[in-house]
Image (tube, rainbow, N blue to C red):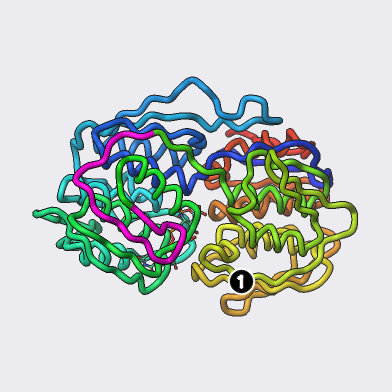
Amino acid sequence: MDRIRIVGGRELAGTIPISGAKNAALPLMIAALMTGDTLTLENVPHLADVEQLIRILGNHGVDYSVNGKRDHQNGNGGGYSRTINFTARDIVDTTAPYELVSKMRASFWVIGPLLARMGEARVSLPGGCAIGTRPVDLFIDGLQALGSDIDVDNGYVIAKAKNRLQGNRYVFPKVSVGATHVLMMAAALARGETVLENAAREPEVVNLAECLNAMGAKIHGAGTSTITIDGVDQLHGANVRVIPDRIETGTYAMAVAMAGGDVLLKDAQPDLLQTALDVIGQTGAEITPTNEGIRVRRNGAGISPVDITTEPFPGFPTDLQAQFMGLMTKAKGKSHITETIFENRFMHVQELARLGARITLSGQTAIVDGVSKLKGAPVMATDLRASVSLVIAGLAAEGETTVNRIYHLDRGFERLEDKLSGCGAVIERISG
Ligand SMILES: CC(=O)N[C@H]1[C@@H](OP(=O)(O)OP(=O)(O)OC[C@H]2O[C@@H](n3ccc(=O)[nH]c3=O)[C@H](O)[C@@H]2O)O[C@H](CO)[C@@H](O)[C@@H]1O
Ligand SMILES: C=C(OP(=O)(O)O)C(=O)O
């Protein structure tokens, strides 16, 4: 099994190209199921989750071809997000089997397009990061509100809509990114108008709405809590660009805040993560939006402690909570980190402790008592964002840190070790 070896203590200097967002690329790829024409997606990151979704879509009959062009050719340590054409001329199977869906959460979302286009879908209950129970009740309630019959049997959700889905008003009892994606896709091909209230406002929802509209859907209000969808009879092909990854952006900004230095996050878009950037600024790093992206600098002045609480967009994202905890382990004082989205997203705490971090848990709040020195150690990645919090801590730890089980990292970070070593970090992947 591959692992990452880091020798801490180097400042970071240079340019890191920000890749297309995993969490935007996945729903856009799934939208390809909704038309027999070709959906061309630019800036698709090269990640294990993308490859897995390509396999899942292939099982339903989606063909794909990768354009030769790489989107980042000149980047220092360059990423290699690509342009991919997806074509679902015929849907050959409306079942998404356990073997494929159990590996990643987002694959469950095929239920919306399959049901809308084919009138039926049989989709295994999903997998994904083990950060909480992650039920699917909102998907079931919402699709029932659009007129679908739903049974859950033998680990599968079986959805049917014999006479096409019917638009309706649905108020989400809780904000859910995935359920907003799915209901938006299902409603796009339903009869009549759907109004989704208390919808997720994440930039990935906006990217999906733009994609569906480019395919001929009639969606208004994405990015606000009320989304209105006028159903259309069919969708067509389109060419859409995946937004830059705000979680990758925030992660590297925190890496610079931790290690010190001066790095341009090329192609990063500040408005996608303003709350997190404000918080990183309060820790003492200098954040400057530029024409090319975001410049992050920190001199030797040290890291100030800042309290955060995770919230749906535009609040501080849960997907940056672990990384921020990594940063706070070396702050000059105590910080409180409260996780409100997932009930089990503190698995990095015990691994950060191996590096010398002092963290105590009190319910959904972690109290981090910053230390002046971390010391390298072997640690284990437990989930995607937890893994990268260990990398951030390792960059500032004395001596050698080895992060094991990095298949989690490969789900969501494109060429992490190249991007960091291109800025002077001593970091390498050890295969086998
Ligand atoms: C691939 C992808 O884009 N994943 C992101 C997506 O996950 P995902 O879409 O799975 O997360 P949700 O926004 O749905 O989850 C928010 C909360 O709602 C709960 N819930 C959700 C659905 C449901 O039917 N019932 C229910 O109770 C969840 O357990 C969680 O407590 O948004 C999360 C919140 O920003 C991010 O951490 C994930 O990185
Ligand atoms: C939790 C994440 O992914 P998933 O929803 O696929 O588990 C993530 O991207 O941080």
Which corner quadrant of the image does residue 281 belong to?
A: bottom right
State which quarter of the image contains the N terminus: top right
Q: Nearer the viewer, residue 241 or 300?
A: 241
Name which residue type carries label 1: Thr
Q: Identify residue for label 1.
A: 309
Residue that sits furthest to the left in the current view? 162
Q: Which residue lies at the image location 85% right of the left edge and 63% below the top edge?
A: 372
Report whether 221 appears left or right of 140. right
Q: Is residue 11 magenta?
A: no
Could you classify mark 1 by the number of other residues whose Cα lies within 10 Å: few (under 14), some (14-19), or many (20 or more)? some
- Relative to residue 120, is residue 111 drawn left or right? right
Residue placed at 61% from the left, 62% from the top?
321
| Residue 59, placed above or below residue 391 | above
Please give left or right for residue 43 compared with residue 374 in the image.
left
Depth check: give the residue in front, 52 or 241.
241
Q: Residue at x 63, y 50 (%)?
A: 388
Residue 299's x, y, as percent? 88, 52
| Main SS, magenta residues | loop
Q: Is mark 1 within 8 Å of ligand 1?
A: no
Q: Nearer the viewer, residue 26 or 172?
A: 172
Res 174 quadrant in image: bottom left
**Residue 133 is at least partly visible in this image:** no
Tell me the quadrant of the picture where the C terminus can be found: top right
Residue 227 appears anywhere in the view: yes
In this figure, what is the number of numbered marks?
Answer: 1
Residues rendered magenta in the picture? 219-238
Q: Position of residue 64 (x, y in %)?
A: 35, 28
Residue found 34% across the figure and 43% down from its top: 30
- Where is residue 148 shown, x and y percent of the image? 17, 60
Rendering coords of residue 105 (x, y %):
39, 53
Task: Answer whether residue 225 is magenta in the image.
Answer: yes
